[in-house]
Image (cartoon, coloured by chain):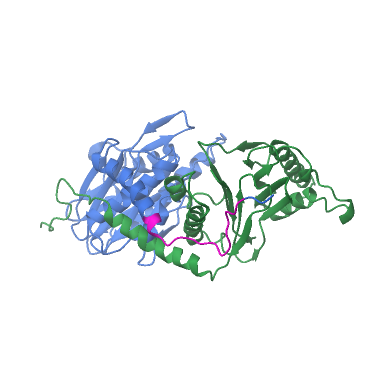
Chain colours: A green, B blue
Amino acid sequence: MTYCVGMMLNRGILFMSDTRTNSGVDNISIFRKMFHFDVEGDRSITLMTAGNLATTQAVISILQERGKSPEERAPDIERLTSMFQVAQLVGQTLREVISTHDDNGQKASAAFGATILLGGQIKDGEPRLFLIYPEGNFIEASTDTPFFQIGETKYGRPILIRAYDPDMSFEEAMKLLLVSFDSTIKANLSVALPLDYHIYRSDTLSRGLIGRVEADDPYFQEISSGWGVALRDAFSALPAFTFSTDPDPEPTA
Amino acid sequence: MTYCVGMMLNRGILFMSDTRTNSGVDNISIFRKMFHFDVEGDRSITLMTAGNLATTQAVISILQERGKSPEERAPDIERLTSMFQVAQLVGQTLREVISTHDDNGQKASAAFGATILLGGQIKDGEPRLFLIYPEGNFIEASTDTPFFQIGETKYGRPILIRAYDPDMSFEEAMKLLLVSFDSTIKANLSVALPLDYHIYRSDTLSRGLIGRVEADDPYFQEISSGWGVALRDAFSALPAFTFSTDPDPEPTA
């Protein structure tokens, strides 16, 4: 499993992904799930992947044109003129990789499927965020649905729904995503630190601040323990429930 | 889908279930998912069901011996001498109902599976809580895992993990479950009010307070809106994230 979130803010896009991959619970590894395609002054594009690792690595390699020698590479993803075209390219590549393996005759116990979050900005366009399905089609974030999650989305969703605000600062958005990731990590063994992030500021058209939150990060540990206390305090602050009849009478013979 | 929780407390067991059933999103109904078998002074047993409605209704009807005329009924569930035996009976009945339909030649688009929460107390025994699988086997709650959820379990789990305390009063436990149900209802259309509950107080050996929280219940609405505010306050109270480098520089040419 995996957990990745892409979040549109008024000042840009925040991307965050975990790094755990597993094939069964006894075979876990750390793999990067966030990938960048940047042309300084022209575009900044970020991809995050969930699903079959062989599939997602193949998609990224094809997009990077690893089949060519380094000096011959001129990836389309760095030349297309709109984010919509990039989403079409990524969707088509994803669908082709999946169908190649599905058609290969060999039956696998695990599915080859994968899902991709794609976000960024190309010169003369707006910042945009897409969720790309294994079938190659995709949907785009809007003001009504300003963030996408892929992978293990459920545990970390309630706090996103309640606390998201498009006006929030990057610092607040980082805090929000760390809380959401913490809830997920606490509940699902297949999501784990370290976490990668990329903060893209609108109209910079270049890679923003990228970083990694390690397992021993003191701020993450503060959030993780502090959120438990804060939740319990919030819960205590809610009005008390009262029964119209006594639920706890002494037993009668 | 469905959401049911059975929660062991030091003073008894709290049961809560939603009432929405759906077959597609365009065919929704209200059905009770909580069932009681009581013999005053001898036992109080509560079942909650998730899964295929035809399966769960058949299981309950068989347990109630609806195949017999009312005066001939003497259900085993009201005569067995331990909760473990009751769990075996319920598990066996569930497995038989599912296998009957699976074997009937007709292929259904929906699975016949179901899961059951069983809790209560029989004279000379302790209060006990079981989670029964479609295969008929089951697990029992313990001090390490004092509550079970069935159905749509993920959205409402983080708050249960953080705020549960075996010493809590029934009022506090009701508040906790209503928050957990509210988070689930907000995120999944197939879980909805009204909610049924049963509060069993240890060693009473008779049915405790049962009730239904309706959609227009003022306390539930207070919890639902109050929890959003409380969560945002809790989130604000967490220490702020700071970047080691400025994430939000002015764009450079």
Can you say whether B27 is above or below B182 in the image?
A: above
Q: Quadrant of residue B55?
A: top left
From the viewer's perspective, tell me whether residue B253 is left or right of residue B122.
right
Can you say whether B34 is above or below A227 in the image?
A: above
Is A179 included in the stretch rendered in magenta?
Answer: no
**Percent from the top left, x then y, of residue B238?**
41, 60
**Percent from the top left, x then y, of residue B47?**
33, 48
Q: Which quadrant is home to the N terminus of chain B? A: top left
Which residue sits at x=50%, y=70%? A218
Magenta stretch: helix, strand or loop mostly: loop
From the viewer's perspective, tell me whether residue B28 is left or right of residue B80.
right
Give, as a single range, the part of the protein colored magenta: B234-250
Instruction: Report how many numbered discs are placed on residues in the image.
Output: 0
From the viewer's perspective, tell me whether residue B87 is left or right of residue A111.
left
Q: Quadrant of residue A16?
A: bottom right
Which residue sits at x=24%, y=43%? B219
From the viewer's perspective, tell me whether residue B230 is left or right of residue B205.
right
Can you say whether A205 is above or below A53 in the image?
A: above
Is B247 included in the stretch rendered in magenta?
Answer: yes
> Is residue B88 visible in this depiction of the protein?
no
State the residue lying farthest toward the front: B253
